[in-house]
Amino acid sequence: MRNLKEKNIVELIEEEVEKNIIRESLIENGDKLIVAVSGGPDSICLLNVLYTIRRKMRVNYGIEYSLIVAHVNHMLREESEDEKVYVENICKNLEIPFYYLKKDVRNLSKQEKMSEETYGRKIRYEFFNEVLEKEKAQKIVTAHNANDDVETILLNLFRGCGLKGLTGIEFQYKNIIRPLMTVEKKDIMEYNILKNLNPCIDRTNFELICPRNKVRNALIPELEKEYNPNILKSILRMKNILIEDENFLNNYTLNVVKQSIIEYNEYIKFNYSELIKEHVAIKNRAIREIIKLKLHDLDGLTNIHINDILDLLENGIKGKKYIMGNKFKIEIINKNIAILY
């Protein structure tokens, strides 16, 4: 994103979001949008930008959309009730429908044997999708920004990710869109000041109580101070380069998979003889894509599983199987053909 300096930061952020919407085809004419609004700086900025640029989007691009707000109270902080009132009042002033969910995340997460963070995210998105279905809406809009993107890239790196993990957060994933993705947090804060929005501040975001907070509040400031004051922009430049590499490898892999598939219905029959001649990076990707065609996701699938499947295919012994629990089986039919079911 260009430097937001002399020109009015409000205008520049609104232009940036408009550009993101058009370039990434995030919103279509007639869309109903469920905006996830916590009351914090990011989501309040997002809501106000989307509300402000509606006329411009209609006049310049023929895109009309409507806004619906969804707010979740996790009952983790005393000020949560005040935040609900704050968001609800904004919605009244802007004449935007308001949906509200209150859940005791601390106790319910213990019952479900999940972390508060994981359980909170689970119930939020379940609620957003419930509102989306009730309102017959098309998209859920979240306020992820450039800082969130860099934090995610660093966290993925520490976990030992592949190339995909280093490409960070996408502008769109399924029905979730993120128009603020290229806007930095400092500019969001300035926007809120200039618009006199007075968002709520969650003090726990400044505590070193989880890995993301440690990256946000300790690691990145240290990197900026000791190594590179423009570390965010540097990491985002890297991300954009890696996206091009990832897109090329993904397209190449999809072509390999397409050529290998013989039958695709309740099972997938594929010719693995040419597939296993590819570079190991492509072989790994191709196996993942074939499994994804069958299961629609790769939950629980690790590199260990992929390596075991490749061993099966490269040995090519008729009748041999690889079984992953109750998820799927891969069986060698003959020297060149395998079946996934």
Image (cartoon, rainbow, N blue to C red):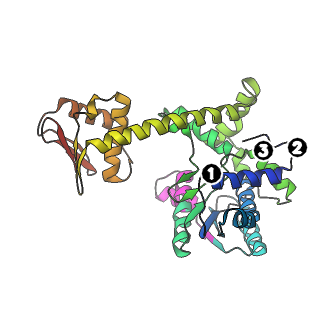
Query: Are the residues at dot 3 and dot 2 in contact (C-beta closer than 8 Å)?
Result: no
Q: Residue at x 17, y 36 (%)?
A: 336
Give the residue at mark 1.
Answer: 23
Check disc 2 and report its element: helix, strand or loop.
loop
Q: Count neighbours of disc 1 (C-alpha within 10 A) and say few if under 14, some if 14 to 19, many if 20 or more.
A: few
Task: Please say if 244 is above or below 188.
Answer: above
Looking at the rendered structure, the kind of residue marked 3 is Lys
Check disc 3 and report its element: helix, strand or loop.
helix
Give the residue at mark 2.
Answer: 6
Chain part drawn in magenta: 100-123
Quadrant into which the N terminus falls: top right
Q: Count neighbours of disc 3 (C-alpha within 10 A) and say few if under 14, some if 14 to 19, many if 20 or more.
A: few
Looking at the rendered structure, the kind of residue marked 1 is Arg
Q: Residue at x 79, y 50 (%)?
A: 12
In the image, which is nearer the foreground, mark 3 or mark 1?
A: 1
In the image, which is nearer the foreground, mark 3 or mark 2?
A: 2
Query: Which mark is first along the chain, 2 or 3?
Result: 2
For residue 186, which numbered disc appears in the image? 3
Query: Which mark is first along the chain, 1 or 3?
Result: 1
Q: Position of residue 298 (x, y in %)?
A: 38, 47
In the image, which is nearer the foreground, mark 2 or mark 1?
A: 1
Quarter assignment of residue 147 = top right
What is the spatial separation of the Cα atoms under label 3 and label 1, in whole angstroms? 23 Å
- In the image, 320 versus 7, the foreground residue is 7
Query: Are the residues at dot 3 and dot 1 in contact (C-beta closer than 8 Å)?
Result: no
What is the spatial separation of the Cα atoms under label 3 and label 2, in whole angstroms? 15 Å
Query: Are the residues at dot 2 and dot 1 in contact (C-beta closer than 8 Å)?
Result: no
Looking at the image, residue 290 sits to the left or right of residue 35; the answer is left
Q: Position of residue 77 (x, y in %)?
A: 69, 58
